[in-house]
């Protein structure tokens, strides 16, 4: 029996364990194994063989719906390459990569809650072709290799979460926010590099320089934040929420606003923290109605 | 008065007002507090306040509920923060029996046009509910008419001859039969269509050959019924969370809201003439809509629709949630 299969079998045997211990029943490999099985079942449009919890919550782009509906009915494949982040302490796992619907690629980020080895919740953000915001070719997207590196001097969970919140606070203009950035910090949104080159937000290059220049002034709030997955050994945090753009001004700091109408971006993003600061960000985000409510879990 | 009669009266008094009228009615008698002119006055006041970005120019109830594209938010947010103008004339509709008014037209946000439909409810002389659909140019494929040529059909304002009028229950049923026809459109027509039926979607006529309607359904078939007989709207898996908040028997008007769910489990399909059509998008999406129907002698004569894309299976907080099916 493979290590993964053994792990899943163990998880099944421990299905009746007390909730407080539940998350510990599925380690990193186990969680990633469940996520991989989920993605394969999704691509095959066959949910029946998966280890579902008695009550399952599922949402796509913040809309609760039934497993089998939405992407489940349109998907035709998923990428072999993915950024996978697991948090055995909370039983959460994230999978960020590419999916195809009738052959058309799109960006996909999924966060899953596993309880007693069973899938209890899945929250997905899907950025399809068409409309704003940033969008590059999903088939050429690759996660930054830094996400695979272990940290020599890992930060605590609280320190990692604080680093991410400081960045998100700064994005929404919190005056006291003091984000820290590692050298060469970079951010990608749907595969587009937004901190360097032609895709740089507001035409300003560099994570810290962008905050100083106020390029995120159109962001009213980074709302309904959830820090769902933390990998202390690798210094990774996965966050989700909404960036609200009221667009009450159509010019910010001499630059045109992203749009002339209000909207929100629903996002799932992975942050790599290195040397105590944000080193790189992989964000999958999609346009939603302004002030879209968060999925209820 | 005997002891028994006294006891009955006492019991009735103890039962209280809640049991004094049918369920769902606050009073057993309701005088029309705000007639058509009054309701349209509130709609105009709302549009005036909106375009001036000054909520104080309209009379709102303290606990007014406001939604924009199915998201609840405070008055003053959303379009209130971006609007720079509105068309001088809107399609104005009213239903004094339910205190509802509607306004369909064009707005500008920082000068950029958007199609707009709004319905409001007036209670105790104040606007208590506002529900809006705003269709912007986002780059997704959807009808978007030339603003300069956007006109409302005069038929919506005309009172019907008595013989052409129908009870509100029948008007509602006709509008519902339209959505039954749209849902799973496979050539089966449940709705009664007037031979001259026409439909406008986001400012474009989509049932009549017109230079502006190139690329719409009118390019495939002309006429409301003919399009449905051809089954060109087969992508509508569900017409969900249907509501009919405004009905005007005198003019034969129904204002409806709901969602067209495009599950897109297939990306091509055959029409009833054997031709193959491609879906506009390959991924699941929903459109949220507000549609005004003009029903003459029990048949659909005109439709004006404002709709926009929202995430697939989005819920409208005004509606009762419907489970997936």
Image (spheres, coloured by chain):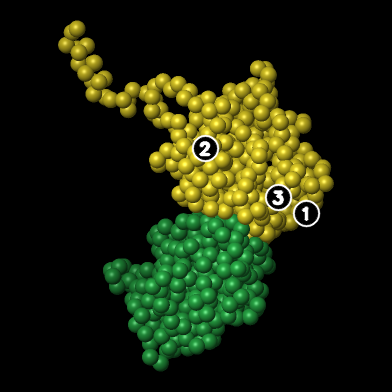
Q: Mark 2, chain letter?
A: B
Residue shown at 62%/30% (left/top)? Answer: B253
Q: Quadrant of the C terminus of chain A?
A: bottom left
Q: Residues within 10 Å of mark 1 (few under 14, many from 20)?
A: few
In the rendered image, residue A234, in percent from the top left (x then y), is placed at 43, 85
Judging by the rendered image, the residue that carries numbered circle 3 is: B144
Q: Quadrant of the N terminus of chain A?
A: bottom left
Q: Colour of chain B?
A: yellow
Asked if the residue under mark 2 is in contact with the one under mark 1, i.e. CB atoms within 8 Å, the reply is: no
In the rendered image, residue A251, in percent from the top left (x then y), is placed at 59, 63
Q: Colour of chain A?
A: green
In the rendered image, residue B201, in percent from the top left (x then y), is placed at 69, 44
Asked if the residue under mark 3 is in contact with the one under mark 1, i.e. CB atoms within 8 Å, the reply is: no
Residue shown at 41%/20% (left/top)? Answer: B29
Asked if the residue under mark 3 is in contact with the one under mark 2, i.e. CB atoms within 8 Å, the reply is: no
SS state under label 3? loop
Q: Which is more toward the observer, A277 or A160?
A: A277
């Amino acid at each position: 029996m493979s290590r993964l299969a053994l792990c899943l079998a163990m998880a099944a045997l421990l299905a009746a364990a007390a909730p407080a211990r539940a998350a510990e029943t599925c380690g990193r490999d186990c969680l990633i194994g469940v996520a991989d099985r989920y993605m394969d079942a999704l691509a095959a449009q066959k949910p029946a063989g998966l280890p579902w919890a008695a009550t399952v919550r599922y949402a796509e782009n913040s809309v609760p719906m039934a497993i089998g509906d939405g992407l489940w009915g349109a998907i035709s494949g998923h990428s072999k390459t993915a950024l996978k982040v697991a948090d055995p302490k909370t039983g959460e796992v994230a999978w960020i990569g590419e999916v195809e619907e009738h052959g058309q690629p799109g960006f996909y980020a999924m966060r899953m809650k596993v309880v007693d080895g069973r899938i209890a919740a899945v929250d997905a953000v899907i950025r399809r072709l068409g409309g704003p915001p940033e969008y590059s070719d999903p088939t050429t997207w690759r996660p930054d290799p830094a996400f695979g590196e272990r940290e020599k001097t890992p930060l605590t969970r609280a320190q990692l979460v604080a680093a991410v919140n400081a960045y998100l606070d700064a994005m929404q203009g919190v005056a006291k926010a003091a984000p820290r950035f590692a050298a060469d910090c970079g951010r990608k949104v749907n595969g587009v590099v937004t901190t360097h080159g032609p895709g740089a937000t507001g035409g300003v290059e560099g994570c810290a320089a962008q905050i100083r220049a106020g390029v995120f002034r159109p962001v009213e709030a980074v709302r309904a934040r959830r820090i769902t997955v933390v990998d202390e050994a690798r210094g990774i945090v996965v966050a989700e929420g909404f960036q609200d753009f009221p667009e009450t001004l159509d010019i910010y700091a001499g630059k045109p606003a992203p749009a002339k109408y209000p909207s929100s971006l629903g996002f799932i993003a992975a942050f790599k923290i290195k040397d105590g600061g944000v080193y790189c960000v992989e964000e999958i985000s999609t346009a939603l109605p302004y002030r879209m409510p968060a999925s209820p879990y | 008065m005997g002891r028994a009669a006294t006891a009955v009266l006492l019991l009735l008094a103890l039962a209280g007002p809640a049991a004094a009228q049918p369920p769902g009615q606050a009073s057993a008698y309701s005088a029309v507090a705000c007639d058509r002119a009054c309701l349209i006055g509130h709609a105009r006041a709302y549009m005036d306040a909106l375009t001036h970005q000054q909520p104080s120019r309209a009379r709102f109830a303290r606990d007014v509920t406001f939604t924009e594209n199915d998201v609840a938010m405070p008055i003053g947010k959303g379009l209130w923060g971006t609007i720079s103008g509105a068309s001088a004339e809107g399609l104005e509709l009213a239903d004094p029996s339910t205190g509802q008014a509607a306004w369909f037209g064009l707005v500008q946000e920082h000068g950029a046009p958007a199609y707009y439909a709004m319905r409001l409810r007036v209670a105790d002389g104040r606007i208590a509910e506002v529900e809006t659909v705003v269709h912007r140019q986002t780059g997704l494929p959807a009808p978007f008419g030339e603003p300069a040529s956007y006109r409302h059909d005069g038929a919506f304002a005309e009172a019907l001859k008595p013989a052409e009028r129908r009870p509100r229950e029948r008007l509602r049923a006709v509008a519902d039969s339209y959505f039954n026809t749209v849902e799973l459109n496979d050539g089966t027509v449940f709705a009664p269509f007037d031979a001259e039926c026409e439909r406008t979607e986001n400012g474009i006529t989509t049932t009549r050959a017109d230079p502006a309607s190139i690329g719409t359904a009118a390019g495939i078939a002309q006429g409301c019924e003919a399009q449905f007989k051809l089954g060109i709207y087969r992508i509508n898996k569900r017409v969900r969370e249907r509501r009919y908040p405004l009905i005007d028997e005198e003019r034969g008007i129904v204002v409806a809201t709901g969602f067209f769910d495009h599950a897109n489990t297939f990306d091509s399909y055959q029409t009833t003439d054997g031709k193959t059509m491609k879906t506009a998008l390959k991924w699941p999406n929903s459109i949220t809509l507000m549609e005004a129907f003009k029903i003459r002698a029990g048949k659909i004569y005109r439709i004006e629709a404002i709709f926009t894309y929202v995430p697939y299976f989005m819920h409208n907080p005004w509606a009762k949630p419907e489970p997936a099916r």
